[in-house]
Image (cartoon, helix red, strand yellow):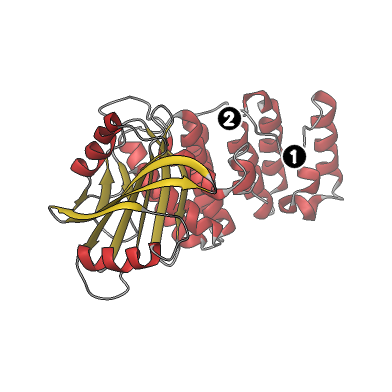
Amino acid sequence: MYRTTKSLLSPVVVFLAGAAALLAAEPTSKPARRPLTLRLPERNWALLIPSKGLRVQEYQLDPRGRQARFLAKNATTDLMVSAFLELAAHDGDAKACRDFYWARAKQSPVPKKDVEFFESGPIALVRYTVPQYRGMKVRQHNVNAYLAHDGLWIYVHLSKAHFEPADQKLFDDVIRHLRIAENHPPDTRELSVFGLTFFQQQDYDKAARYFQQALNLEQSKRTLNRTMWRVLVDQLGMAYGIGGNPAKAKGVFEYGISVDAEYPMFYYNLACVYAEMNDLDRAIHYLIKAFERQDNLDAGERMPDPRSDSSFTRFQYDKKFQAAIEKIASSRPVKAQ
């Protein structure tokens, strides 16, 4: 069958890392740095967090549309920023949100000193210090920021170990620019992450919808680098194909070839489409083209082995298919996954 997300994102082998890679990927051009965003599908607003020096390390989205979170780090300053949003436990503003989450935080055995409650515009905050952790002096400075919006509660946590007074500016800069942006439609990366989420949940119709929206944006203005653009096209084609729409899958992979003619996986997945459509001649044609280009795989990728691929199961004992595989193997050994 079409290759899986795991092999697609190799060497990234877990979904959280794959989504984080998409969110952290550099655009093809580098305008003013985009803020980090956190949002839920079907909501036309987003939480914006200034991204200076921050790189997303983990990302998680609840496919039911109830929760989203990410963890980011500035490798130079060691500032950690995590953001979390979910459906509110009950009606209430930012202070109610703070009361709810701080009650949970107080149950933690981690000691908290110099606790201070304050507000900044619509944001309710708590500032505190963790002097030590498991017997080690860490002098960790923490600021929790809370907001409430559109039936959701939002919790942003900033922390830095071995805090010095000069580090306060790092925290102030984030809090000062932390905001909710209305009428802020998702960009290509966010739509791609939504697609990945639903793909992992095997909801291929929803996955295809978000991947298609992302590709539409890319066709209007290219923002993804080559590797991530290939990821997007591949995922869209697979979502259509596995979801039972081979005609649309075929169109996507043909489009990929028209733009990036030397990438072998577009040909391989197109061969899978034709095999699923029981068109052996075209399947063989594109298999050969795929393996002729296998040197153009992205770093960490390997060609699938059609001899063990379920798309070609019906042809395993077909003499024409066997001859094609022998021809591929003789000209270039199949570097199977």
Tell me which residue sits at (35%, 37%) in the image: 219
Q: Quadrant of the C terminus?
A: top right
SS class, disc 1: loop
Judging depth in this view, the residue of 72 and 195 nearest the camera is: 72
Q: CA distance from mark 1 to mark 2?
A: 17 Å
Q: How many marks?
A: 2
Tell me which residue sits at (37%, 30%) in the image: 27
Point out the tag, 1 or 2, that comes first from the N-terminus.
2
Kind of residue at disc 2: Tyr
Name, please, the residue furthest toward the bottom. Answer: 90
1 vs 2, front mark: 1
Q: Position of residue 46 (x, y in %)?
A: 26, 52
Residue at which label 2 appears? 263
Q: Position of residue 297 (x, y in %)?
A: 62, 29
Residue at which label 1 appears? 337
Kind of residue at disc 1: Gln
Judging depth in this view, the residue of 132 and 308 nearest the camera is: 132
18 vs 122, left or right, is: right
62 vs 250, left or right, is: left
In the picture, the disc for residue 203 is none
SS class, disc 2: loop
